[in-house]
Image (cartoon, grey):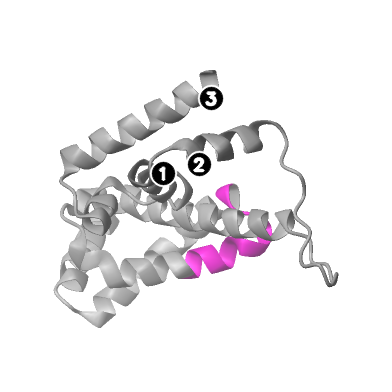
Amino acid sequence: MNAALALNDDLLAARSGDPRALERVLSRSRQDLRRYAEYHCPINDVEDAVQESLFTVSRKLVDLRQLECFASWLFRIVKRECNRYKRIKRSLLQVPITEDIEGPHYPESKGLARDVAKALESLPAHYREIILLRDLDGLSLEELCSKLGLSLQAAKARLHRARSLAREYLAA
């Protein structure tokens, strides 16, 4: 229990701008983050995801409203980083590097990927944007609200409507 109290004290001090407390918080969190990242990331990206996550935590710790949520917030950040690395790798694997004069060769889209791409293309721009930001980039609802200039209720409604329209397109 003393470790939990010490962590809370360090979190409070780190939010107030104490660099040593921030260093203690990050060093205590590193091993748990690494273990979590090993489960969610390709092995080559684990250390990069942990480093990026710790950097994000150091910058955004002052924005955390409830210290009780620190652990779940921390793991959400590292999972988002892992997903970002997966998307980068997937996009690099989908476009083979060729040296043709005609330009790059894109593989023919098949199946579900083609259908989802067509469903997204059929959506109005504001619906397409919110789906891509939320589901592909992994932004939280709060981040969506600030990026798009919407209230929380408006962002939720737009996201729901966009997903409903995409489902209708895919069901047809």
Checking the image for residue 55, the label placed there is none
Tell me the amino acid under the disc marked 2. Answer: Glu
Q: Secondary structure at mark 2?
A: helix
**Crowdedness near tag 2: few (<14), some (14–19) or many (≥20) residues, C-alpha within 10 Å:** few
Residue 112, placed above or below residue 103: above
Q: Is residue 25 visible?
A: no
| Residue receiving disc 2 | 121
The x, y position of residue 61, in whole percent, is 25, 65
The x, y position of residue 103, in whole percent, is 77, 67
| Residue receiving disc 3 | 170
162 relative to 81 in the view: left or right: left
Q: Residue at x 57, y 59 (%)?
A: 85
Asked which quadrant contains residue 15, the reply is bottom left
Q: Is residue 163 visible?
A: yes
Q: Are marks 1 and 2 in contact (CB under 8 Å)?
A: yes
Residue 49 counted in the magenta span = yes
83 relative to 141 in the view: left or right: right
Q: Residue at x 70, y 31 (%)?
A: 111
Q: Earlier in the sequence, mark 1 or mark 2?
A: 2
